[in-house]
Amino acid sequence: MKFTIAIATYNRLAFLKRAIDTALSQTVQCEVVVVDDGSNDGTQEYVEDLSQTLAASGDGRLIYHRNSHNLGHSGSVNAGVERATGEWVKLLDDDDYLAPNCLEKMSEAIALRPQAVLCSCQAVQVDEEESELTRTRAVGPGRVFYIPQEDIHYGMLLEQVPFGTPVQVAFRRDAFLKTGGWDSSLDANFDDIDSWIKISRFGDAIFINEYLAYRTVWCGSFNQKFSLENRLKAHILIKHRIYNLVNSKHRSEIPNIKQIESYLKLHWSLVALKKAQVRSTVSLAFPAMFLPGSWNLLFSLNHRFADKSSSSKTKLGSVSNEKENLKAYLKLKLLEQSLKEKQWGRATKFLLPIVFSPAAWKLILNLVILKKRRSNLSPVRKFVLIDS
């Protein structure tokens, strides 16, 4: 099995050097294709010189490709896969990097499930100094498991199958080419998720519960340039695309698309709230905030966040915030009653203080979500253990 690591880059030479180094240092040999989208920071000179130096010593693995004109991130990914000669392609953004044994572990897992077209691992989020910030959460059973093709889109729709960002994912090249590649209209805004949706039409998905990739979180990341409103629009589009591909055996178990749209509006309003973007919080949440079904779906799909919150070192009932928690709980109960009785004016009166109350949100996540965990949404049960 041959792997190609495809690195899309644009004016990030300092980061790119690290990405190339970790690609060439893999414990299994692989081809490395660097696609330069028209950089003017010395990227071309550096990669060409390195490629020639390696070739002089008999190592011809590093290939440099410069786009004839600026294609954007999605177009550069497509160009990298076109130039690749490996059966499997591992994408790598220039500001991310890999553990030395990433491809070795992926190769071992794929060998156990040849029907797979996608393989995803866990990732560590780091800052510009490579200090750890967070880690993606393990899913499914054991160290390696797979999900049959007919269950993937159902799991993606209900957010129980998290493939992750490009640094986590590898795919079979022939399946990628059948999809037509990345959608440039979504450039750096859910274009990766859109690709996983399309590739997974052609085979199973493998998940590895090991941290084999590192994603840099910083202000220069591609997706930082999009407003939350644009992120919401793209997210809704992606959910529509997944919805249309859900296997017929799951159709009776999924919410309708309008409920999903409302849930997404609530989700992104919470993101806006965390960023203290008050105007966006209100505009994104309206009118979904008045629909009980939207809240139910939000609570059900975010149970993993509830698990994380419930294990926090700061206990919900600590003496220092007991009074605020009690006030927030009463407001929540009054809001719930108003929504049930369709008393919209009264509901608005209680909603606004709740929106701007950290204590209220903590209660929502720790009390209400946990009560909703036994919802009517059926979990994905097709996790098939390969290696414990």
Image: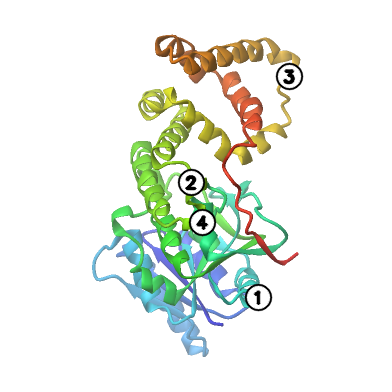
Q: CA distance from mark 4 to mark 3?
A: 44 Å
Q: Mark 1 and mark 2: span between their CA atoms?
A: 36 Å
Place of residue 126 in the rendered image (x, y in percent of width and height, measured from the top left): 58, 50
Q: Earlier in the sequence, mark 1 or mark 2?
A: 1
Relative to residue 273, is residue 6 depicted above or below?
below
The residue lying toward the viewer, choosing from 292 and 188, is 292
Of the residues tagged 3 and 2, which is closer to the observer?
3
Left or right: 242, with 180 as reference point: right
| Residue 45 seen from this side | no
Residue sitting at x 58%, y 57%: 214
**Sequence-first disc among 1 and 3:** 1
- Which badge, 3 or 2, is on the more N-terminal residue? 2
Residue 260: x, y in percent?
43, 40
Q: Residue 364 at x, y = what percent?
A: 59, 25
Say which mark, if any, is on residue 249: 4
Amino acid type, callout 2: Trp
Q: Which mark is residue 112?
A: 1
